[in-house]
Amino acid sequence: MINDASQSSDAVDVQALTALLDGEYAEIRDLVRTNLAAHASVLEEAEELGIDAFRERVRELTVELAATGQTGMGFPKEYGGGGDIGASIAAFETLAYGDLSLLVKVGVQFGLFGGAILHLGTERHHRAHLPDLITGKLMGCFAMTETGHGSNVQALGTVATYDAPSQEFVITTHGDAARKDYIGNAARHAELAVVFAQLEVDGKREGVHAFVVPIRVDGAPAPGVRIEDAGRKMGLNGVDNGRLWFDGVRVPREALLNRFADVTPDGAYESPIENPGRRFFTMLGTLVQGRVSVGGGAINAAKVALAIATKYAVRRRQFEAASDGAEQLLLDYGMHQRRLLPLLARTYALHFAQDVVRTQLHEVFSGNQDDEQARRELEARAAGTKALGTWHATRTIQECREACGGAGYLAVNRFAALKADSDVFTTFEGDNHVLLQLVAKGLLTNYAHEFEDLDQLGMVRFVTGQAVETVIERTSVHKLLERVRDLLPGGDDWDQEAGLLDPDYQLAMVRFREEHMLAGLARRLKRGLDEKRDPGVVFSHVQDHVIAVARAHVERLVLEAFVDKLRTLPDDGDVGDGGDGGNKAALGLLCDLFALSTIESDRAWFMEHGRLTVQRSKAISREINNLCRKIRPLAVDLVDAWGIPSAMLRSPDLVG
Amino acid sequence: MINDASQSSDAVDVQALTALLDGEYAEIRDLVRTNLAAHASVLEEAEELGIDAFRERVRELTVELAATGQTGMGFPKEYGGGGDIGASIAAFETLAYGDLSLLVKVGVQFGLFGGAILHLGTERHHRAHLPDLITGKLMGCFAMTETGHGSNVQALGTVATYDAPSQEFVITTHGDAARKDYIGNAARHAELAVVFAQLEVDGKREGVHAFVVPIRVDGAPAPGVRIEDAGRKMGLNGVDNGRLWFDGVRVPREALLNRFADVTPDGAYESPIENPGRRFFTMLGTLVQGRVSVGGGAINAAKVALAIATKYAVRRRQFEAASDGAEQLLLDYGMHQRRLLPLLARTYALHFAQDVVRTQLHEVFSGNQDDEQARRELEARAAGTKALGTWHATRTIQECREACGGAGYLAVNRFAALKADSDVFTTFEGDNHVLLQLVAKGLLTNYAHEFEDLDQLGMVRFVTGQAVETVIERTSVHKLLERVRDLLPGGDDWDQEAGLLDPDYQLAMVRFREEHMLAGLARRLKRGLDEKRDPGVVFSHVQDHVIAVARAHVERLVLEAFVDKLRTLPDDGDVGDGGDGGNKAALGLLCDLFALSTIESDRAWFMEHGRLTVQRSKAISREINNLCRKIRPLAVDLVDAWGIPSAMLRSPDLVG
């Protein structure tokens, strides 16, 4: 791919911007870029090979990537890993520039399976399994989801009964709703499974625990294990998803991943965490890296789509043969700018938000700052960023495909795979709506160990009058306005007098929205409870508010991440100055565009709640158009700064 | 598929509703349903066969369908057709319940290729080609689009020069931008192509004309013809799209499709239509049935997605194992209702709007009412309905996939194919944005023969002060309000006092929006022209208004179609009454839901333009929630009424 020189500007120093975006993980990201370019043929193989051959190819590549060290960054060095959790996420994010089957295979093997062994197991499991799983010699799967219990892990139906005489667990699938479903690596490659099951000791249920279970011996299903191929999927056909049933499968007592609970040889259950609920959520919490990974991967998949569409839009003339000389490139049209550039701005915003959640994950899991408060914050942020990042990917890839017209429909131009492969990101590692409900619940309560309780009815029951009262008090409009007045000049008219491009104004708007929505939700819940209505009905009636408040919360976090990032940069130039300083100015334009288009798309709410006059609402729309025109000449540089290997864009006719 | 009896209600008479929806075309629709069920295996074959085998299979099925008469309804009876244009569209729409490669193959063969021979050719072409193309024995393609001229047919680069001595046309591709691209049937099956080229007679360019050109002889490319396979696409891989180049290809004088223009043997150009622009748009106008067909097909593809998601939502419990008895089905949740039911309502609305445009097409092309005014109205309505219908399909299929969670991602559950195959509908037969620009231009002007001028700059040039002044005058807010006052009680407070469920209120709102937007657009254009600004820049700055006004216009037409339909129904029952009368009540709920959710999604605009108070805006949102709860018990009946053969839903685990 050769960039059209006329389309790069002096205003942005692309190399410096790439360095800024890569941050402390430039080295591992560059390793991944090199690996992506070396194996670029996988993009064609994904189309040309049959399912069986492509699955084998993806397995092969997984092992090859493992040999370069990029996939093992999150494991301890003593077992052959890189000992750097943050770097492992950064590597995963960057891998999303390429084929997404390979990405998900890596995620299943090293993130889900490897992560469970690492975080739920103890030294005996680490010694036994980590060295071989890090190289990819030992493949495994993560058998949690069941057909009948997609989002409700606590209720799953697989049972593991301790048999004291033999010192074994006996694992059985009870009913077809309890079959393990959509399990990546299960249909073909996994030898081991980490199986989540209800532990039963001496007739007593102790809750969900994880066990290491051999599911294949010499390529054939292990005795008592039934495996079914989940078959062809919309995308990700390089990943062998399958279904598992267990019929009295026996594993030794040591197969229990016993970091948080154990069973003694003679059948006594013991755990350092007394409260069963808290124990369960502690176990589940260790798996948060999956959500952080998928969110980051989705954001980078969106970048690939935007890079192609942007390059196409500065190459293509809508009407090449128009008779006069005034022909414009696609990206010179206001509508086309409106279609692509707010998505570009949002992608940058989400990139910086992802930096924040990745850093939090690193701090917690490296033990630098690992307390209950930090874990709770991390889990909420991971859930929210994953939801917004994956929805953003779906929407962006679609818009970019359409913006490339019929050419965008040809497989060679990448969108086919991007769309089909990324589509399930909104669903797996936690359905986005369910995740946002968790976020909202976290906002309403202060009890970390209840956070992961996915039962919606439980949410209503749990939000007792007490919690609700607190929220209502804390978020009263009066107090909200007081706090805003401290931030902004203009007194009671802050929302009329502040400059639209003042970040404090932008932040005040999204903060006000969040807190006001939260208070409204709390009031609605309280009314329902006061009236003794059925909790399910109460929840059903407020559910759209629940989702809205969570979305508002996460968008606030995203804007804060962007503004915070900008404030750390040296302030030494304008767009057009050239050199490094122009980068801050360019990012400033993007941040304004993100903030104002976020407000614009919810401007009805702001008007309904007295925070936006008609005049100001229209002014925001005009300012967005201005910002688009200012960003237009920088657009190619801004997508080039992501450092996507050109072979990953393919699309010879669109970007060549 | 067996319906869960507990989910059907007494309120809707499903059979009667199906009859109402099928209308006068029940017979042909039932034939298509029978054919779909008979060939249901094509849905699996689309996944399992390789591209080559699947293309052959789709060709085979096309010929089999042709033998039943369903695909030839639009051709004259004397050549073996059915002589009923409306029925041919109805058949095509219904075919969209099944595999969409087959749909598009049928569209290419009988709609584009066959339609061009029928509408642009004369008896000699009809006699020569119609009998064999109607049976599918003769396959052909429609070679209009060029790589460099996607939306600008008037500027295409292929040239056909008349050579008087030999009485032949010599057809040549000038430059790679003039290669014919994305041509369905070209890569493999077409023997003939209808080729659009600039006609050159005696050194003079006479504009774009169509020629019948043999491109394959005994399966090999004809001399001078180069054919390239467009390769794998996101979907529709049963259609063999290809590229064509012509290098001095000679065809006899009689190859010109000469209904609207001819060349005499000695090289004189003659046409009954003097004005070259008008001649061109008359030719192009005959192809409007393609847009009507795609729009209708898209709406029916959306129905398939909604039927699956709705049935899943009354089967699936979010948390099956919740401990108390208050478990709810997915569709009992407010959020889930909000996700699916407004889409259900919009699908019904678009169905009735499609009835209107299909009827207009039938009237014009059957010669019942064929004047310039009628053609212009038809073209505008076809463009608008196609744009809204295809965007609706993309959005609905996506939402339904997500609403089915991970199960929605498995190929067996239909969404994979629906998404991938329908995605290009927003682009082909006219890119939706370009189509909406045409609609807007039609609103601004009264010159039918300029309507199809796709040049955006031309639009600005054309919209002279005169046209703009007229629009501004006609749509002044003062006059708008006067007209509304005639319709509604309440005087100047009509927008405050009318009932939200009063169809006159709903219509007044969308009419006011359309006319107000149109006036605003006209004023902006006038200002740009008065200031002598570059037309390209003026257009770029107003382009989002152009799209918005067109969308508002088409949504008004859609709502009118729904309200008009309701008014024709006998008024003899309520929801819950049982029997036929309940159907009108159910449709009334859907119409209200469509109208109010249309207003709600643009409520910011209505507030910005003084037509919605904050209180009323909130009241509309509450009313939408109420309507959703009322429609909830009818939902399964409402999707069953579409009469989608159960085999077309597949999804054994979702709807079984």
Image (spheres, coloured by chain):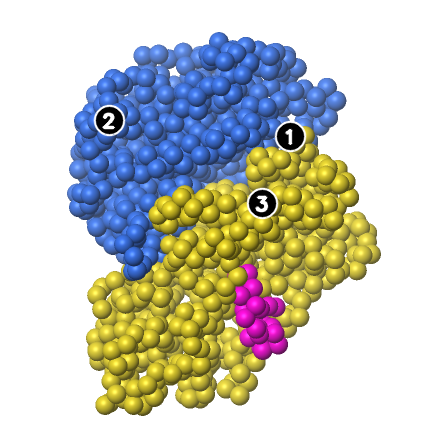
Chain colours: A yellow, B blue
The residue tagged 3 is A516
Assign a secondary structure to mark 1. Answer: helix
Residue at position x 24%, y 36% in the image: B637
Kindly indicate the quadrant of the structure image that contains residue A173.
bottom left
The residue tagged 1 is A614
The verdict on residue A378 being magenta is: yes
Of circles 1 and 3, the one toward us is 3
**Mark 2 vs mark 1, CA separation in Å:** 42 Å
Could you say which is closer to the camera, residue A493 or residue A523? A523
Q: Chain of mark 3?
A: A
Identify the magenta region.
A359-382
Residue at position x 17%, y 46% in the image: B2
The verdict on residue B359 being magenta is: no
Left or right of residue A114: residue A177: left
Mark 1: give few (<14), some (14-19) or many (20+) Cα within 10 Å: some
x%, y% of residue A346?
60, 50
Q: In this orientation, does residue B574 appear?
A: yes
Q: Residue B582 bears which disc, if any? A: 2
x%, y% of residue B392?
41, 37
